[in-house]
Amino acid sequence: MKHVGSPAVLAALVFAITGADAPAPAPASRFTTPQAGAGSTLYAQNCAKCHGAALTGGSAPDLFGRAFTASSLSMGALNQAVTQSMPLDDPGSLTAAQYAAIIAYLLAANCYPAGATPFPADGNIPDRAEKVATQGGATSPCSLREVEKP
Ligand code: HEC
């Protein structure tokens, strides 16, 4: 069988072909639209009273925009914070699937694109070191329609 090469080698190849002026690659999709839709309801029920209905914060930090981006959470740390410490007044009170749906909603609101693969409920997060940030400099949370696949 032909040797295919490591992802790093492939990435270097793509870079060599496309050149330094190529636009940054689109962020990988990490959740499905139905999952984020379920998460939206769960967020309203379990998180909004402290983090704000529009994710703009309140008694708790923003989960959208500059403050959220500046918090410099990785995907793994976001998952850990939510599943282990939230809701702050009743940690661990939701199911793994419910937490995954809420994180899907947070990513959708921060303008990550929806795709075919749900956010994992088993803690096995792809690219867990990648920093979470509001995508594209959005100034208001994205709707689920906006992040759906074309
Ligand atoms: C009772 C109020 C309260 C509720 C309800 C609550 N949180 Fe929090 N949350 C906080 C506070 C206060 C902090 C900041 C201090 C801390 O991390 O303990 C925080 C921190 C966080 C952080 C880390 C933010 C950062 O920038 O580091 C995330 C993510 C988060 N909450 C998500 C959620 C989600 C998702 C829910 C719903 C499942 C939720 N929270 C429910 C009060 C709350």
Image (tube, rainbow, N blue to C red):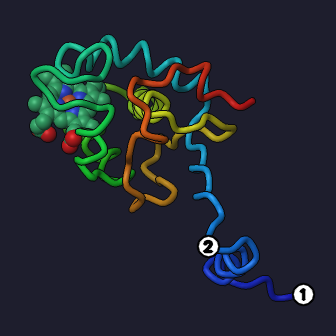
Q: Which residue is drawn at 73% across and 85% down?
A: 5
Disc 1 on helix, strand or loop? loop
The residue that disc 2 covers is 20
Decide: few, some or many residues near mark 2? Use Cα within 10 Å; few <14, some 14-19, many ≥20: few
Label 2 sits on what residue type?
Answer: Ala
Side (left or right) of 2 relative to 89: right
Q: Residue at x 39, y 51 (%)?
A: 75
Side (left or right) of 1 relative to 146: right
Q: Residue at x 20, y 13 (%)?
A: 49
Return the x and y of residue 82 as percentages of the image width and height. 28, 37
Disc 2 on helix, strand or loop? loop
Q: Residue at x 29, y 32 (%)?
A: 63
* Picture quadrant of residue 79: top left
- Estimate the spatial distance between the alpha carbons at disc 2 and disc 1, rounded to whole Å: 32 Å
- The answer to whether residue 136 is visible is yes
Return the x and y of residue 122 as percentages of the image width and height. 46, 46
Q: Which of marks 2 and 1 is in front?
A: 2
State yes or no: Cβ of the residue under disc 2 lies below 8 Å from any atom of ligand 1: no
Label 1 sits on what residue type?
Answer: Met
Q: Tell me which image quadrant ligand 1 sits in.
A: top left
The residue that disc 1 covers is 1
Q: Which residue lies furthest to the right in this view?
A: 1
State yes or no: Cβ of the residue under disc 1 lies below 8 Å from any atom of ligand 1: no
* Picture quadrant of residue 64: top left
Return the x and y of residue 89 as percentages of the image width and height. 12, 23
- The answer to whether residue 93 is visible is no
